Image (tube, rainbow, N blue to C red):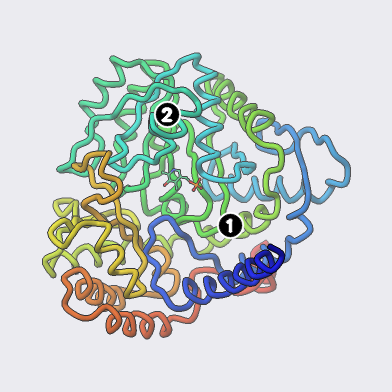
Amino acid sequence: MKQNLFETALKLVEASRNHEKYRDTECINLIASEGLKSPAVKEMLSLSQDLESRYAEGNNDLEGHIKVRYYQGQKYITKIENCTADLMKKLFNCNWVDVRLVSGTHANLATFKGLSTATKRNGMVVAPLSAGAHISHDYTGLAGEVIGLETINHVYDTDEMNIDPDKSAEVIRKAKPGIITFGGSLFLFPHPLKELCEVAREVGAYTVYDGAHVLGLIAGGQFQNPLKEGADFITASTHKTFPGPQGGVVIANLEDKRMKVGIKSVQRSIFPLTTSNTHLARLPAMGLTALEMKVFGVELAKQTVKNARVAGECLFENGVKVLGEKNGFTRSHQIAVDVREYGGGKKVAENLEEANIIVNKNLLPYDDQKDKENPSGLRIGFQDVTRRGFKESDIKHLCGLMVDVIKGKRPLHDVREDTMALRQSFKEIKYGFQSIDETVKYAKRHC
Ligand SMILES: *Cc1c(COP(=O)(O)O)cnc(C)c1O
């Protein structure tokens, strides 16, 4: 028994070391939900070791600042939390945020719970899971099974790869839900917020834009601006296209009594209902990422979207069925491809993995929700390679390797050598600060 315990510990250390080398240096990562932190943000995380052990429960005021603390020893923690909130507010041009969420799912939990309490309504209109909604929006996930919401689907137009505004307006008027969600995990084109947020007001519902995937693109002004287009709340992860530490955030504008009621209810859902410890060590790194996105976000988001579109075109020209062709394949960081004729999403994703190209299989809008184990598609994201410095010609090179795998043109180990060589030729992380020191110098120059 004892020996097993020690052996397991050794295995643990070895696997951890191997993982860092494998995924950080030997693979090309095209998982659409994973961000790549800058050296400065990583340094900030390693500097925050004491914070990693602390507790700081509290109540916030309506600016998203700390109002009440319950423990002693928090004079700096309160500054850290307030500064992080302020940096996020500046970046997203809004007057309220909450940074205490430990993940995007947690942000949805607190927001959905808070707004269903505020409206005393149980219905929530969401995109169908197969059309890109996150499991936390679904009746089979957090929304239904944990919070007990009754979900009603938006009408999805598979031709446009988007929510159908007219038909969904009808659904909303009939269902009179408390909440209407937008956004998702398979998310190619901006959702019709302008049209549907008006309908939401008409029926007395709050709108929640789940920007987990696209938060960095929103920050860089290259996707839609949900608050400006009428959404009440943005919920998000802080580690996808927003390339910060793993965590979550809720963003809104407190502009009238209706929003005050909603925000207060969401705050109560965050604390005391769903948090105690809020994983404080991620906050300085999140704040620093917000600054980076203010400084580099436009260029990063532009190149990310450009790379995704070029990949869509390139794969399409090579005979791979890329969705959304009539609208230019994508306006986000990701594309969706149908690989049924090559054996389906599961097999193709596994073959790509053998070639050290990491993607995930994905349901496509016309798939049955029950086919999750072997869906038709792949979802491919370009935020990681973009931050490593890939430009259009590098993307085309990478797509060539993918086509070789998808169509079975070359042995997988052969392609793997090329993948590793391509990965090795990108050693830096762009569109970010290289150290805390560099960040401080930059900030001082611009004070
Ligand atoms: C990833 C994702 C989430 C969940 O985020 P976590 O931070 O992993 O909990 C929520 N919503 C959408 C749309 C997502 O893609």
Evaluate whether residue 445 shows in this view: no
Quadrant of residue 231 within the rendered picture = top left
Q: Which dot marks residue 195?
A: none
The x and y percentages for residue 198 are 35, 24
Count of labels shown?
A: 2
Quadrant of residue 140 within the rendered picture = top left
The x and y percentages for residue 54 are 78, 49
Q: Compared with residue 297, is residue 213 higher up or lower down, i.e. above or below?
A: above
Task: Kindly state the secondary structure of the residue where label 1 is placed.
Answer: loop
Q: Compared with residue 161, is residue 137 higher up or lower down, i.e. above or below?
A: above
Task: Kindly state the secondary structure of the residue where label 2 is placed.
Answer: strand
Alpha carbon distance from label 2 to label 1: 26 Å
Q: Compared with residue 201, is residue 289 higher up or lower down, i.e. above or below?
A: below
Residue type at mark 1? Pro
> Split into 4 quadrants, where in the image is the N terminus?
bottom right
Q: Residues within 10 Å of mark 2 (few under 14, many from 20)?
A: many
Task: Work out whether mark 2 precedes mark 1 in sequence or the reverse, and give the earlier one.
Answer: 2
| Residue in front for this viewpoint, 99 or 123 | 123
The x and y percentages for residue 234 are 48, 38
Disc 2 C-beta below 8 A from ligand 1: no
Q: Residue at the location (53% across, 31% down)?
A: 111
The x and y percentages for residue 312 are 22, 62
- 315 horizontally vs 249: left or right: left
Evaluate whether residue 65 shows in this view: yes
| Residue in front for this viewpoint, 92 or 313 | 313
Q: Residues within 10 Å of mark 1 (few under 14, many from 20)?
A: many
Quadrant of residue 308 within the rendered picture = bottom left
Which residue is denoted by mark 2 in the rendering? 207
Foreground: disc 2 or disc 1: 1
> Split into 4 quadrants, where in the image is the C terminus?
bottom right
Q: Residue at the location (34% across, 69% down)?
A: 353
Which residue is denoted by mark 1 in the rendering? 245
